[in-house]
Image (cartoon, helix red, strand yellow):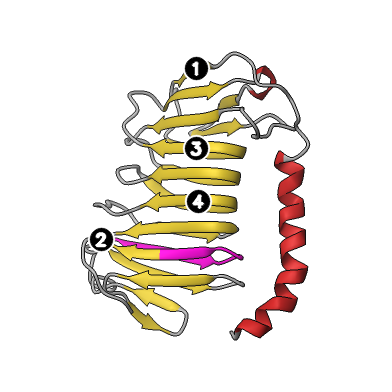
Amino acid sequence: MKARAWKPILCVALPAIFGATACVIGNNNVPAGELRTESKTVQLGAAKTVEVHIKMGAGELKVDGGATDLLNADFTYNVPRWKPEVQYNVTGDTGRLSIEQPSGGGHMGNTRYEWDLHLSNHVPMEMSVEEGAGRANLNLVGLALSNLKMDLGAGETTIDLDGPWKNNLDATVHGGVGKTTLHLPRDVGVRVEAHSGIGAINASGGFIKAGDAFTNSAYGTSPVTLRIDVKGGIGEIDLELGGASGTV
């Protein structure tokens, strides 16, 4: 798209998007209090599969595997009413884990709001993540994850899928304002269907491009496949294939 064509679109889109972001982080003019860190553990119980929902309005989010239970988490914050809400229930064989920032929570000034979440590698899992504004780092390698949905707001997000996978993964990533980086494996089949918005989608490391699709050399031959649907927003989305340099 030519630079001149961007201007009328940006004039309409930017106020709408930043206006929505302001609703998340601009109406919480509260003083920072004492910094506290609280730990939370959730046991798996009788569940054989788990649906995980993570919703953060604004702050710093880290998600990783390696938990000894279903969830081992540390929450750091200095506004008491922003204490994260953690709920877990089991119906039949399915557990539902919800981790949410309280309604009206935000992040500004001298406030701190950080989540460090570790999930079990051993239970089949589906995950949805809603991120408002801030920074997120999701290292999902090792999780028994079959479905991932990401809705991104304003900020910087890294999603690391670069490692061995025992099962197929279907993922949807909706880009927002800011930069999103996806680290993808070279030896596991990968197919990314990428649709750019106003921003850009970049691919490096030896992807094969056909139309809106990016694949690696293992696609169609490996027993496991990662299928990822990427919809760009105003920000930039980078697809990085593990290890080597090169550009599509």
Q: Which residues are magenta?
A: 223-238
Query: As displayed, is residue 13 above or below residue 178?
Result: below
Percent x, y for residue 73?
Answer: 45, 25
Q: Are marks 3 and 2 in contact (CB under 8 Å)?
A: no
Q: Are marks 4 and 2 in contact (CB under 8 Å)?
A: no
| Mark 1 / mark 2, whichever is N-terminal | 1
Percent x, y for residue 190?
Answer: 33, 67
In this figure, which residue is indicated by the disc labeled 1? 37
Q: Which mark is residue 242?
A: 2
- Crowd rating for badge 2 (residues with CA inside 10 Å; few <14, some 14–19, many 20+): some
The type of residue carrying mark 2 is Gly
Cα–Cα span, label 1 and label 2 = 34 Å
Name the main secondary structure of what is drawn in magenta. strand
Cα–Cα span, label 4 and label 3 = 11 Å
Residue 132 relative to residue 202: left or right: right
Quadrant assignment for the C terminus: bottom left
Q: Are marks 1 and 2 in contact (CB under 8 Å)?
A: no
Badge 4 element: strand
In the picture, residue 49 is in which quadrant? top left
Quadrant assignment for the N terminus: bottom right
Q: Which mark is residue 156?
A: 4
In this figure, which residue is indicated by the disc labeled 3? 61
| Mark 3 / mark 2, whichever is N-terminal | 3
Percent x, y for residue 10?
Answer: 70, 71
The type of residue carrying mark 3 is Leu
Cα–Cα span, label 3 and label 2 = 23 Å
| Mark 1 / mark 3, whichever is N-terminal | 1
Q: Is 232 in the magenta?
A: yes
